Amino acid sequence: MTKSLAVNSKMDTHDLIGLGSYSFRYAARIKEKIEGTLASMDAIAFVEETARLGLKRALICENLNYCDSDETYFKKLAETAVQLGITIEVGMKGVSTENLIKHINIAKILGAKQMRIVLGDASETLPNDLDKLKSKSLKSIRSILPILEEADLYLGIENHFDLAVTELVDIVSQINNKRIGFIYDTTNCIGLLEKPLDVLHLMKEHLFSVHLKDYECRKTDAGYFFSGADLGEGSLDIAAVIKIVRSYNPDACFILEYSMKPVEKMSDKELLDWERERVTRNVAAMLEVVQNEGF
C-alpha cells in the first residue's frame, strides 16, 4: 500500500467528499439572471449550492471566472465557506509562474490547502508543442516550490487533454517534492485513448485527489462514441475506483464532476433545472457508493 500523503490528515472522511464547479457547466456559462435558477453562478453561489447538497468540500475552477475578482470578494467567499462548513480547493488552468503565484495568493485568502492545475491553456485541442509545455511546467512549478512550502499548499496536476499520463508522471518524478502530486480524473484520459484504471495505477505514488465522472462507450458504424453518463450508469466501475484509490491513499479527496450533454433542445431555464436535477442525483449516487465502500 502506498503511504498516505497526509494532505488531509486528522479530517473526518466525509470532509474528503466534495463537488467540483464543472458540475455546473451551464449555470456558470449562462450570464443572464433567470429567476428561480442558478444562472450566472459565481463562486459564492457554488459554495452555497455545495452546502445545500450536503457536501463539505468545494473545488472552484476556472469555469466560474473567479480569479480576477478583488480581495473583498475573496474575503466574502472565504467567510461564506467558513459559515457553511465548506473546505475550498482552488482550481486553475495554465502553468505560467505568474498564474501560479496569482492562484496561490487566492488560495491563501480562501484558506485552501490544495490546488488543482490543468497544465495546458486550451481545453479542446492538444497543445501545439508538447515538449515546450512539459519544459515550461517543470520550470514554473519548480520556481514556486518555496512559496508552496511557506503557504502549506499542495499542488495537484490533473490528467487532461494535453500531456499523456507517462509525461505527467515524469514531471512529478523530476520535481520530486511532497507538495506536487496528481489529481486523477476518471474520464479525461479517454481523450488521449488511455484506460482509466491504467492511468490511476500510474498516479498511485503521488495521488492527492480524484474527480469522479462516469461515461459510456457505444459502437457506431464508423467507430466508437464516448459520452458522459450519470454516475454508476456508465462504463466505469465507480466502486472499484474508490476502493483502489483508498488503497493507494486513504486521505485522497473525491470530487464529483458532471458532464452530460442534454439530448433535447431546451430553454435556458429548462436547461438549468435539468442540470441541477442531474447534479443532485449524481451527488446522491456518489454518497451511496462511498457509504457502501466504508467511508
Image (spheres, rainbow, N blue to C red):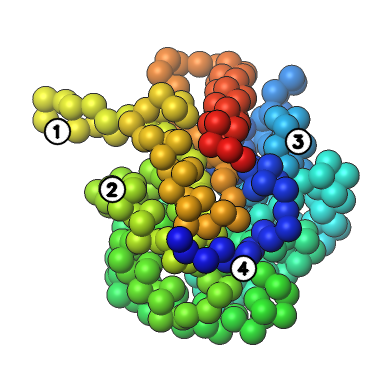
- In percent of width and height, residue 166 lies at 30, 66
- Label 3 sits on residue: 51
Q: What is the number of the mark on residue 195?
A: 2
Q: Is residue 204 above or below residue 256?
A: below
Circle 4 or circle 1, nearest the eye: 4
- In percent of width and height, residue 170 lies at 35, 74
Q: What is the number of the mark on residue 249?
A: none
- Quick one: SS at disc 3? helix
Between discs 3 and 1, the one toward the N terminus:
3
In-front residue for pair 232/162: 232
Query: Distance between the Cα atoms at labels 1 and 2?
Result: 17 Å
Circle 1 or circle 2, nearest the eye: 2
Q: Which residue is at a point 48% across and 43% down the rendered structure image?
A: 242
- Quick one: SS at disc 4? strand
- Residue 97, image quadrant: bottom right
Instruction: Determine contact: label 4, label 1, CB under 8 Å.
Output: no
Q: Classify mark 2: residues with Cα within 10 Å, few (<14), some (14-19) or many (20+).
A: some
- Label 1 sits on residue: 223
Residue type, mark 4 in image: Tyr
Instruction: Determine contact: label 3, label 2, CB under 8 Å.
Output: no
Between discs 4 and 3, the one toward the N terminus:
3
Q: Which residue is at a point 45% across and 16% down the rendered structure image?
A: 265
- Residue 127, image quadrant: bottom left
Q: Is residue 44 above or below residue 160?
A: above
- In percent of width and height, residue 43 lies at 71, 45
